[in-house]
Image: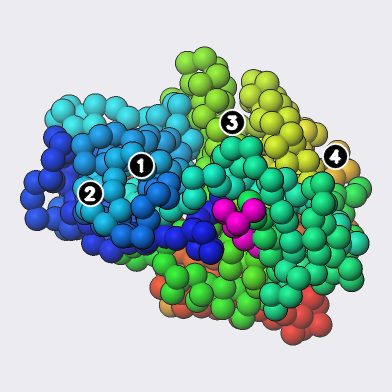
Amino acid sequence: MLRPRPTATREQLNLDGLWRFSLDYAGGPLDGTLEAAVPASYNDLFTDPAIRDHVGWVWYQRTVRVPRGWAGERVFVRVDAATHRGRVYVDDIAVAEHAGGYTPFEADVTDLVRAGEEFRLTIGVNNELTEVTIPPGTVTMGQDGRPRQSYQHDFYNYAGLHRSVWLHSVPEVHITDVTVVTALDGTVSYEVATSADAEVRVRVLDDTGAQVAVGENGVAKIDDPIWWRPGAGYLYTLVAEIDGRDVYEQPFGVRTVEVRGAEFLINGEPFYFTGFGKHEDTPVRGKGHDDAYLVHDFQLMNWIGANSFRTSHYPYAEEVLDFADRHGIVVIDETAAVGLNLAIVSGLTGAPPRPTFSPETFGDETRAAHARAVTELIARDKNHPSVVMWSLANEPASNEDGAREYFQPLVELARTLDPTRPLTYSVVMFATFQNDKIADLFDVLSINRYYGWYVAAGDLAAAEQYLEGDLRGWVATFGKPVMMSEYGADTMPGLHAVWDTPWTEEYQAAYLAMNHRVFDRIDEFVGEHVWNFADFQTSHGIHRVDGNRKGVFTRDRRPKAAAQELRRRWRGLDGGKPSR
Ligand code: GCB
């Protein structure tokens, strides 16, 4: 889905700010005096627990005046993210409904609004996670008659309008989609879709705006192209034009991605990932996008020497990917399929886990939702040069029966939608190189392991042995590139010890150093993503103290001691830069 961009033929009105807010909507103006910020999660804005713990629909409303000059244009409302389900009303007419909390949707409202006049825009947002949503969860009715939400991931189920809302205009006949694929010699293959039969002209501009190529029959050729590289995000612009009627400008980079043997190649050169799994998570805003945190997080990643990150565990705001494109940061782009694993929840209850993949648990309907999530992710992010790999799921029960039947069609779908990017998934602890049923379907094996934390806590010598045996098993069994997509230890800033004591700053640093010793002994290793960039909020529970504390930075982005250690390694300050 095209990101709205202002061009000579397209305009947009940003609708962010304060909206009226209510738990109820019966048509017409919302009752009450509450106002909510957009973009933001609503959960932490208010003091009332009935709002924070609410399960179901909430409602946002504001009036919008359509710009005077838009007469004759088609007018769309675009919602960048309504987590997890959104419903849009113009006055009291329903115009769009969308499932999936981290991908955009829009409604053509041309026939319902008039240039220069106001209308009432109401957006319902539903936070329920069920067996057929991505991510999945369970809603049960409490004895007090209130619904309760549970789910298989630790991060808090923030909800609301997490990203911008727009009103935008396009001409009657317009460009509806652009796909760009590049080769290192400067060959740019493109496809442009239009709303009606129309001739499309294509030119390519460099970053000064000078024209460097003209398209013909789906191909444009840039002479001596400047490649998009990790650390140097050079961008060209593909300008697609319907003879004077519509213009769309699509940024892109000239770069290739390839898996060859046990190597991950960007522009034909081996690439070693350093960086983090992240979250969209900040105090008060929850999962609301924030440009200040965006800039600061990228500054910190640069400071520490991270060349990449994974959008764990859902697609991030498009602003984030645009920024990564411009600054040469490499991204592993993940769907919101986190928690397809019922073994994870049996925990303290003693109940034997139910099978994850079955008609009663995660079956055809879940997979259909997952397929939509894959489709929407690739449609949204296919033109970002920063995105080098799709991650189809985090920690699915890939060791259980039914996993292969569940994942094979999704892998085929992703390969059809995008034959150019490798595929991965993050492998849960219980899935071993001996019992995993899907690893051979994927290109890169991303391993999540917590030896020294959930296993062998406080015993880094044992942890080192377990880890090395485990990773070598994956390397030897599959002959594919292997990277560590999660390793980390919860750490309370300010807690210190001279021994290997979990939760101390010293322990986090020693834990990471232990992992790095192992990685450096394995030639086939292609990268390390620490869990997590920053501390983040989690759901209520006894396993977390005000959130997950595996951050190398605190939730307000102050470095823990391990940050300095990582910086020395990743910036090569000890001479030990992990690139091969
Ligand atoms: C994992 C999950 C991640 C959790 C992490 C943890 O394996 O993928 O979402 O936050 O472990 O800290 O337990």
Q: Earlier in the sequence, mark 4 or mark 1?
A: 1
Label 4 close to label 2 by CB (< 8 Å): no
Name the disc covering residue 119, or none.
2
Real-space Cα distance between discs 4 and 3? 26 Å
Q: Secondary structure at mark 3?
A: helix
Name the disc covering residue 12, or none.
none
Q: Earlier in the sequence, mark 4 or mark 2?
A: 2
Q: Given the image, on which type of amino acid does mark 3 rest?
A: Ala
The image shows residue 566, relative to residue 14, as above or below, that is below
Q: Which residue is mark 1?
A: 109
Q: Which residue is mark 3?
A: 371
Q: Judge left or right: residue 430 versus residue 189.
A: left
Q: Nearer the viewer, mark 3 or mark 2?
A: 2
Q: Earlier in the sequence, mark 2 or mark 1?
A: 1
Q: Residue furthest left?
A: 32
Q: Quadrant of the image for the C terminus?
A: bottom right
The image shows residue 368, relative to residue 534, as above or below, that is above
Q: Given the image, on which type of amino acid does mark 1 rest?
A: Val
**Mark 3 residue crowding within 10 angstroms, few (<14) / some (14–19) / many (20+):** many
Label 4 close to label 1 by CB (< 8 Å): no
Q: Where residue 113 appears, x then y in whole percent?
A: 29, 45
Q: Where residue 138 appears, x then y in whole percent?
A: 37, 30
Q: Nearer the viewer, mark 4 or mark 2?
A: 2
Label 2 close to label 1 by CB (< 8 Å): yes
Give the residues drawn in magenta, as a range.
243-251
Work out whether residue 121 or residue 450 is closer to the camera in this orientation and state it: 121
Magenta span includes 435? no
Label 4 close to label 3 by CB (< 8 Å): no
Q: Judge left or right: residue 106 versus residue 574.
A: left
What main secondary structure does the magenta stretch of the protein show?
strand
Work out whether residue 319 or residue 442 is closer to the camera in this orientation and state it: 319
Work out whether residue 437 or residue 91 is closer to the camera in this orientation and state it: 91
